[in-house]
Amino acid sequence: MARKKKHKRQQQNVLESVFGIKLEGGDGDHASPTLSATPDPAAVEARAEEIAQRRERASYAALIRTTAAEAAREVGIRKDRARGFVKLLDLSGVSVSSDGEPDTTEIARIVRAGVDEFPELRARGTTAYGSASRYPGGGNS
């Protein structure tokens, strides 16, 4: 019998120490859980702010990747390879304005550098600066 009581006590200590729940009741079989501490409103607000900032950063990162994929297609990266190409680029230095618009000049610079580094991803007949023909008139001879 002593062993059973020890187990019950240990269970109550774990619930209280880990989850902040203290079991109260007469016989122990029908105990109702109660919270031993109320959450601090400032801590709850700080946690909500942290989550909002994390989501905002994620949305900015997605917008930067989408803009970079569009820029990659414009400079001649094959359409089916543009998203994979963007994954190879380091876009961590791209800033976002207060209006939520990414720095397109910086993205274009990074994409051009990536095209120079990975020319095999370009579509045929394109250069790092977009579609171009070898011949000024557009002819083949």
Image (cartoon, rainbow, N blue to C red):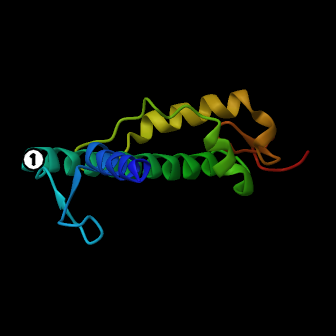
The image shows residue 121 at horizontal and vertical percentages of 77, 42
Residue located 30% across and 69% down the image: 29
Residue located 68% across and 34% down the image: 115
**Viewer can see residue 41:** yes
- Quadrant in the picture for the C terminus: top right
Residue placed most toward the observer, 25 or 99: 25
Which of the 4 image quarters holds residue 17?
top left
Residue located 84% across and 50% down the image: 139
The image shows residue 19 at horizontal and vertical percentages of 29, 50
Q: Please, which residue is most extreme toward the front here?
A: 1
The image shows residue 63 at horizontal and vertical percentages of 43, 52
Residue placed most toward the observer, 121 or 86: 86
- Mark 1: which amino acid? Asp
Q: Please, which residue is most extreme toward the right here?
A: 141
Residue placed most toward the observer, 17 or 85: 17
Q: Please, which residue is most extreme toward the bottom here?
A: 30
Mark 1 neighbour density, 10 Å: few (under 14) some (14–19) many (20 or more): few
- Element at label 1: loop
Residue identified by numbered label 1: 40
The image shows residue 24 at horizontal and vertical percentages of 18, 61
Residue placed most toward the observer, 16 or 19: 16
